[in-house]
Amino acid sequence: MLNTPPLRRLRRLRSSEAMRDLLRETQISLSDLIHPLFIEEHISHAVPISTLPGISRLPESALADEVRELYALGIRYVMPFGISHTKDDKGSDTWDDNGLLARMVRTIKDTVPEMMVISDICFCEYTDHGHCGVVHHNEVCNDLTVENLVKQSITAAKAGADMLAPSAMMDGQVKAIRHGLDAAGFEHVAILAHSAKFASSFYGPFRAAVDCELRGNRKGYQLDYANGRQALLEALLDEAEGADILMVKPGTPYLDVLSRLRQETHLPLAAYQVGGEYAGIKFAALAGALDERAVVTETFIGLKRAGADLIVSYYTKQYAQWLAESH
Ligand code: PBG
Ligand code: ZN
């Protein structure tokens, strides 16, 4: 029988809302959230994405209005993804100053100069085979792809991107992009490296969203999800190559990686809550199985508690609307 009362009663710290608010260790606000956008060229109406209910592909002509609306809601960071009708075997539209990527960046910066544009730097939405680079003999060729990533990065920076988020998982991409940007006079443009990007089935809804008909898979360049130590190696290499921020992707199934990385670096960290994570919550909420706002908030706090300073999430706009409603 336990007859000595506990000396330390942690429930004292949970005794009222004021007490809980005082002691909360982790906060989430709109300054932590980056909103991805899907922009399709050559269409005239928004197309809802069936795998991501609540999210649509917007026509390019609607981008300016959307950005104004997002900014009015308090969102200050966007990551545009293009849905291209101008695909080829290399993704050369991405380094055309009049290509979709450059046009999206310019439209956003011309409409709301204060909106920070974080440009995804990759090729899979712009290649006819759906891979993240140049394919030779059924392999994505690392060094040729890196050369093209540098061209794409300079094009995005010239168009006004504030930050670049290379996501192709090619070796040496961060270093090459950093040198390329600096040599072209864009030393102020930051790099948010997709450092630990796992070959994940949670990307399924996204691939449907961007019409990526991938032949094969990405296991030859994205991380094996069984490998936590290798993920840390990738991230520390990106730090050494000059990355400004390191990202772990997907988010929720990889909290251990985020938390270990937090112990190994002093750089800011990001987490990408990917399409499959969004879809899992959204479809459950649509079925009435959970309280959507509460669950979304809990996942954001979980990602931040594990070590993320910032989060890319398809829930950003919805979250901003919830905040606006409860004011
Ligand atoms: C491709 C890219 C992917 C995502 C963002 N950029 C997926 C992939 O590697 O197929 C996934 C985002 C998501 O699933 O929400 N460079
Ligand atoms: Zn890609």
Image: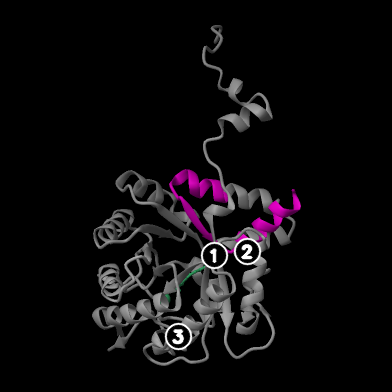
**Looking at the image, which is closer to me, 12 or 280?**
12
Q: Nearer the viewer, mark 3 or mark 2?
A: 2
Would you name the residue on which mark 1 appears? 114
Q: Which mark is residue 126?
A: 3
The answer to whether mark 1 and mark 2 are in CB contact below 8 A is yes
Q: Nearer the viewer, mark 1 or mark 3?
A: 1
In space, the residues marked 1 and 3 are separated at their CA atoms by 28 Å
**Mark 2 Cα-neighbour bin, 10 Å: few <14, some 14–19, many ≥20:** some
Specify the amino acid type for callout 3.
Tyr
**Mark 1 Cα-neighbour bin, 10 Å: few <14, some 14–19, many ≥20:** few
Q: Residue at x 67, y 67 (%)?
A: 69
Q: Which mark is residue 324?
A: none
Specify the amino acid type for callout 1.
Glu
**Looking at the image, which is closer to me, 231 or 314?**
314
Q: Which residues are magenta?
A: 299-327
In space, the residues marked 3 and 2 are separated at their CA atoms by 28 Å
Q: Is residue 133 left or right of residue 288?
A: left
Q: Is residue 134 visible?
A: yes
Secondary structure under badge 2? helix
**Residue 101's spot in the image, x, y percent?**
47, 81
**Residue 29's spot in the image, x, y percent?**
58, 49
Dividing the picture into quadrants, the one containing residue 281 is bottom right
Label 1 or label 3, whichever comes before in sequence order: 1
Magenta-drawn stretch contains 323: yes
Q: Residue at x 67, y 62 (%)?
A: 72
Secondary structure under badge 3? loop
**Residue 285's spot in the image, x, y percent?**
70, 58
